[in-house]
Image (cartoon, rainbow, N blue to C red):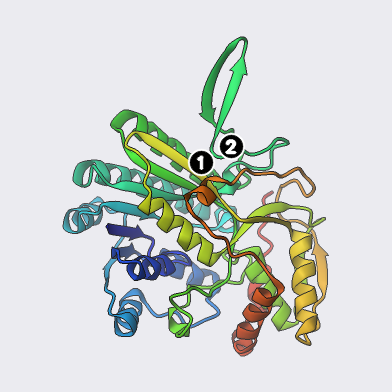
Amino acid sequence: MRILILGGDGYLGWPTAMHLTAHGHDVAVADNYLRRRICREEDTESLFDTPNLHERARLWREATGHDVAVHVGDLMDWGFCERLFKDFAPEAVVHYAEQPSAPYSMKGRREAMLTLSNNLEVTANVIFAVREFAPEAHIVKLGTMGEYGTPDIDIEEGWIDIEHKGRSDRFLFPRQAGSLYHTTKIMDTDLLWFYVRMWGLAVTDLMQGPVYGFFTEENADDERLFPFFNYDELFGTVLNRFVVQAVAGYPLTVFGKGGQTRGFLDIRDTLSCVRLALEQPAAKGELRIFNQLTETFSVNTLAERVQRVGKGLGLDVAVKSIPNPRLEAEEHYYNPVHTGLLDLGLTPNYLTDDELAHMMEVVLAKRDRIQEHQFVRNVGWK
């Protein structure tokens, strides 16, 4: 397929481009480097040197012979969006092109407005571009399990059947986001569902849990092809952050009681999930939703595992509870259904001590690049 990846410079975007070309697809990526710009403004950088998209594409072509077409521009600009879709004529679109940080979205009015305008306008432009220039294209949008919140019932896979006063119907599962970023993801889902009903779009919405890791089948031989790997409070997911803190000798920062439980997955499984969804697409007029996770862990459990594995490597790993800057339940029920992607053929990579140790060993080699001031930013939800 001709697959257009929007947000192709990000933590997931570039690994997805390599993965899809390695599996025979014709891939183009688009990005405006928003995440890099925000990281510079906030003094947070990737642990690894991360070449720009043109250089990454050259490295990948030299290593494998696979081409990735690079387009640098802003998808909020309709002119850029129009040219991109006309020129490439995608058969499928992977939509990662959003401001992806919950803490950043909660910093203040400026950050909130950037998150709202970028995320919603880009999604709307993508919808209109697909309808006008690629009406048969399948949209795969990266959602988030954070849309659901932590309800006191099992989280179904996107939809729930309701019986009420003798009648029944099927609805999107109730969403109750815990940050402005997650709220924009709910709005994305609602926009897509509206235009699925109005225009018969084919859409898969992947409700993804926090992702960890940096190894993929495609980058194992060249660190320059690693993803844009943040370890700070703004952009670093919790397990990635804990691994770098452990190597730095910085106490693992557990928010509050540490009972917050979420569904996690290895970055390799993200790539597999996206590819499986693309290769077995939703039908026209369907909003198909999958809960994209492989295991659930509490923050305390992750901290304990990182501490144990770190100590096995001779690291002095402490765990420290700090006041929770977020407004969230710290002890709660959490049981999400996640069978859809397994049914499509996902073979999960589960979190093992060996995997954690391997991550730590690579980070140890970069110990001199770790900047401890990045770990805690105290962005408060209040």
Judging depth in this view, the residue of 236 and 28 nearest the camera is 28
- Give how far across and how far down residue 282 sits, in percent: 38, 42
Residue at 29 percent across and 32 percent down: it is 199
In the picture of the structure, the residue carrying the numbered disc 1 is: 186
Q: Are marks 2 and 1 in contact (CB under 8 Å)?
A: yes
Badge number at residue 78: none
In the picture of the structure, the residue carrying the numbered disc 2 is: 175
Q: Which quarter of the image is occupied by the N terminus?
A: bottom left
Residue at 71 percent across and 47 percent down: it is 327
Judging depth in this view, the residue of 107 and 174 nearest the camera is 174
Most extreme residue toward the left, as rendered? 87
How many C-alpha atoms fall within 10 Å of the one at disc 2: few (<14), some, or many (≥20)?
A: some
Q: CA distance from mark 2 to mark 1?
A: 7 Å
- Any part of residue 76 in sight: no
Kind of residue at badge 2: Arg
Residue at 70 percent across and 76 percent down: it is 245
Kind of residue at badge 1: Ile
How many C-alpha atoms fall within 10 Å of the one at disc 1: few (<14), some, or many (≥20)?
A: many
- Tell me which label, 2 or 1, sits earlier in the chain: 2
| Kind of element beneath mark 2 | loop
User: Is 161 situated above or below 361?
Assistant: above
- Give how far across and how far down residue 67 sits, in percent: 26, 73
Within the image, what quadrant is residue 242 found in? bottom right
183 on left or right of 66: right
- Give how far across and how far down residue 348 sits, in percent: 57, 61
User: Is 63 situated above or below 9?
Assistant: below
